[in-house]
Image: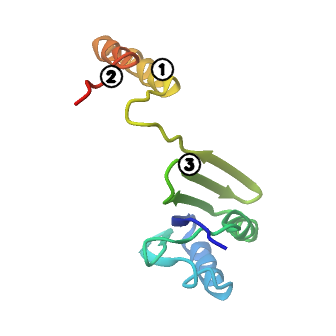
Amino acid sequence: MYRPSSSYFVTISGDESTVAAAAAAMETRSISPDYLTCGCTEPDARHYEVLEGSMDRWNDVDEVLATLARDFPTLTINAKENCEEPCFPSREMRFRGEDMEVRYGRILAPDEYDAKTIGAAMKLLRGNGMNEAADLVLSLVDAREEEW
């Protein structure tokens, strides 16, 4: 069975002693290095990624990280899943104890414009007194690059 390739980036942060315990648990549970490799260790954080850049899509990554988060409820676990397939949205997950938040990316063609994003940019710019910049962003709604 074919599964698309994905890359994964996971950051575990919190109190150093608890982060270290979670890192050890990732090794005993074969999360690291079987799926993810710790690329960077900081005080109070560990950063993991796929050693080869991508791997077959990890279908139960959210369940595995949710279990880790429940076992270490004071930590925050941020994970990014970037699927290598075209038109497949990226996913960002955030775990803290029993709580999980998931956000999906949107994929647009080069000549498409996302009204929600343009509206948010305009609101931010106008809120900071940058009305000319907001007007320029608004002009992108109907803009299209000329054909070659």
Estimate the x, y position of residue 38 in percent, counting from the top left. Answer: 47, 78
Q: Nearer the viewer, mark 1 or mark 2?
A: 2
Q: Nearer the viewer, residue 66 or 137?
A: 137
Using a 10 Å C-alpha cutoff, classify the residue at mark 2 as few (fewer than 14 neighbours), some (14 to 19) or many (20 or more): few
Q: Nearer the viewer, residue 2 or 133?
A: 2
The quadrant of the rendering that contains the N terminus is bottom right
Residue hosting label 3: 89
Look at label 1 and name its amino acid: Gly
Using a 10 Å C-alpha cutoff, classify the residue at mark 1 as few (fewer than 14 neighbours), some (14 to 19) or many (20 or more): some
26 relative to 106, above or below: below
In which image quadrant can residue 63 be found? Answer: bottom right
123 relative to 114, above or below: above
Residue hosting label 1: 119
Estimate the x, y position of residue 15 in percent, counting from the top left. Answer: 57, 67
Q: Residue furthest left?
A: 148
* Among the two numbered marks 1 and 2 on one chain, the one whose residue lies closer to the N terminus: 1
